[in-house]
């Protein structure tokens, strides 16, 4: 089962991360949280674990309008928010991967028509952001 949309780009990790932030903003998403996995692994597990994962950040992206609609329909959907977007580049990789949660995952967990509408809108926006990142 696929639960993400993915693009792989010929950009540095830093450039891909910056472009991801820009593309998300263009689609109405702000970044609420940022988890630097490499730094966290380094602090908690040591340098070897950090180097093994490579550059890896999880951006918690939120479109307030969509989040508001989703929570109005089903308050428990907050457990699935924000929409996580990963930017990662493994050791020795020449390309950077950007992955966004597939909002249709929410639809599989809810029978609500309102949730389906929000998921469809979020899906369209996240896929447009990924297309912008890849230059498509």
Image (cartoon, rainbow, N blue to C red):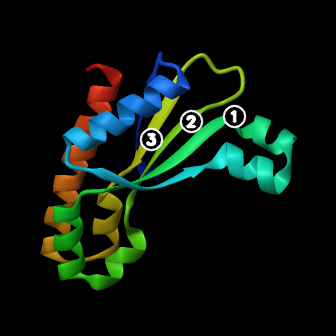
Q: How many numbered marks appear?
A: 3
The quarter of the displayed image where residue 129 is located:
top left
Q: Residue sitting at 16 percent across and 63 percent down?
A: 65
Q: Are circles 1 and 2 on residues that touch, CB within 8 Å?
A: yes
Q: Secondary structure at mark 1?
A: loop
In the rendering, at what x and y percent does residue 32 appear? Answer: 39, 58
Contact (Cβ within 8 Å) of mark 3 with mark 2 = yes
Please identify, in this view, whether the residue under mark 3 or under mark 2 is nearer the observer.
Answer: 2
Task: Name the residue that disc number 1 marks.
Answer: 54
Residue at mark 1 to residue at mark 2: CA–CA distance: 7 Å
Which corner quadrant holds the C terminus?
top left
User: Residue 120: where, in percent of width, then height?
Assistant: 18, 56
As drawn, is 4 to the left or to the right of 70? right
- The residue tagged with tag 2: helix, strand or loop? strand
Q: Residue at x 77, y 41 (%)?
A: 50
For residue 88, which numbered disc appears in the image?
2
Q: Position of residue 74 (x, y in %)?
A: 25, 82
Give the CA distance from mark 1 to mark 3.
15 Å
Q: Position of residue 9 (x, y in %)?
A: 45, 21
């Amino acid at each position: 089962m696929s639960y993400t949309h993915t693009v792989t780009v010929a950009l540095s990790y830093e450039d891909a991360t910056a472009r991801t932030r820009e593309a998300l903003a263009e689609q109405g998403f702000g970044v609420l949280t940022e988890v630097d996995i490499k730094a966290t692994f380094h602090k908690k597990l040591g340098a070897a674990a950090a180097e093994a994962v490579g550059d890896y950040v999880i951006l918690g992206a939120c479109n307030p309008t969509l989040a508001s609609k989703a929570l109005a329909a089903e308050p428990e959907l907050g457990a699935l928010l924000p929409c996580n977007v990963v930017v990662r580049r493994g050791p020795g990789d020449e390309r950077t991967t950007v992955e966004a949660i597939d909002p249709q995952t929410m639809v599989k967990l809810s029978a609500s028509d309102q949730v389906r509408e929000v998921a469809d809108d979020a899906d369209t926006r996240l896929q447009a952001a990924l297309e912008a990142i890849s230059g498509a």
